[in-house]
Amino acid sequence: MEAAECKTELIYLPAQSFIYDWFQSINTFYRPIHAYLSILLCILGTVANFCNIVVLTRRTMRTPVNMILTAMASCDTVVLFSNLIYTTHYSFVAFQHCHPKHWSYAWALFLIAHAHLSLVAHSSSVWLSVMLALVRYMTLRSRGNMGGMQVTLRHSYIAIAATISVVALLNAPNFLNYKINERRLNETCAVLDPHYNNAPAYLPGIADIAKARHCLVFRLAFWISGLVFKMLPCALLSLFVWLLLRILREVRENRQRLLKTSRHTPTPVNTRNGRLSLTTGTNEKLTRNGSLRARGEKVDRTTHMLLAIVAVMLVTEIPQGIMAVLSGMLSAEFRHNIYNNLGDLLDLLSLCGACCSFIIYCSMSGQFRNEFRRVFIPSGIQCSRKGSASIRRHSDAYSTKMSYLRPLETHCNGASIIDTDRSTSINVFGSQVRRTSTDLTPMSMTPCSPMPSSSFAASPMPTSTRLLNGADDSDATDETSRLLDSTSSVAPPALNGKIKEQHFKNI
């Protein structure tokens, strides 16, 4: 495929060097196992990316970031599946069984399609990772700013379509680079049957239009592939990694400052009916601190996962970009003695990068793991796991809700005394539910005064206070949410203002 007249080198290298021998030894050691590793990675990566697409397109998972991740998984699937067919055919069929049908015109067309599909799909995946970092940066920058731009699903669809379209358009010079040449079969592979020595074999070559005008199309395609599809996205990814890390540091410092401030805030005092009343200031502080910590941890986990994806892309793309640019700037000795000897290792890096996303999602996203279990693991296996206790962060599920009870009416010396300030509160610590009742406004003690309901705390702990350690996390969460909803409003007189104990017994 190489055209001697289409040269792009600017620096000339010596014809002999010990470095060439070292790279040749690396290629000699790795080349025999490359085909087997490539096929294994292609199969595993195709299955893993299919799982990514299925899980990320679920209704509960459809977010702008997840849609970009789905597009990246689709591009990686195209690359892996095309490479699987290419490696299998040319490594184990075409060269080992040198027959004209394995070097037909159709297989030459496939080879050109494989080159274009791999380049467009892989470059689209790289630029989509840049778009992913940009979307995350915009989201963090506009967080808390009502006037800031909010990224929606529609924006993500437009960004995906625009990215793939622009990459395909920029690849137009590469589409004009190739044509199909006819050669003799014995010049292509080792013919086993002498009758096929002069049989035709078809292979791609450099098109005449690419060689015209001092190889303008060829040079343009080369520099676009090296700079626009490799070096430029790597530079942008490096910039966004630095910006995201800086934002994470700012978010962490702000969260620590807010937690420190809220820790020293005095307990508030409220007035009701003209009288001073005690408040649950400690609970309010815990709730506020827990919600701040939970939101901060969620932001950190999501951004760290996206940073891991971007970091993998950088590790796999930077060496390829450097080698591609150097192969054009340096003389032919670099391509023959260094680039060609490291080509298989560079392909292996690309395949590893296309396979790593599933591992990152499973290891860093609890929502992805839960949805994956719901989709791919049979319900019988899930039921057998419900007996095991789950571990959840204290700050992720702390909440307090309070509801007022029916006014307590007592009679003293013929007069009716009504206490309107009785309440019940439910504290949720992870999977633990605790219920307490208290008088927010302690009445003045008289011989006829009822016992303050705060003495309820001294009574034996009701059924509602038992721990939910024996239940599954998801069941406990659902039951707790129903419990909180049932007590979150003022009880109507028709219910006599009672919080029914069966709600707590059902936990």
Image: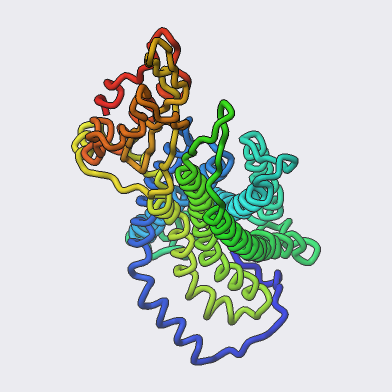
Q: Picture coordinates of residue 393 (x, y %)?
A: 38, 50
Please determine whether, in this image, residue 278 is positioned above or below residue 210. Answer: above
The percent position of residue 291, horizontal first and vertical second, equals 50, 45
The N terminus lies in which quarter of the figure?
Answer: bottom right
The residue at 46%/65% (across/down) is: 349
Report x, y in % for residue 135.
64, 48
Q: Quadrant of residue 185?
A: bottom left
Q: Is residue 5 left or right of residue 468?
A: right
Q: Is residue 24 above or below residue 410?
A: below
The answer to whether residue 102 is seen in the rendering is no
Q: Quadrant of residue 494?
A: top left
Q: Nearer the viewer, residue 485 or 244?
A: 485
Residue at 66 percent of width and 45 percent of height: 144
Q: Position of residue 116 (x, y in %)?
A: 58, 51
On the picture, is 279 further left or further right than 504? right
Q: Number of callouts in the render?
A: 0
Q: State whether residue 463 appears in this view.
A: yes
Pick out the residue farthest to the right.
Answer: 213
Residue at x 66%, y 42% (from the top left corner):
159
Q: In front here: 492 or 112? A: 492
Residue ranking furthest to the top: 494
In this view of the protein, which residue sits in the foreground, 155 or 336? 155
Q: Nearer the viewer, residue 192 or 203?
A: 203
Q: Quadrant of the C terminus?
A: top left
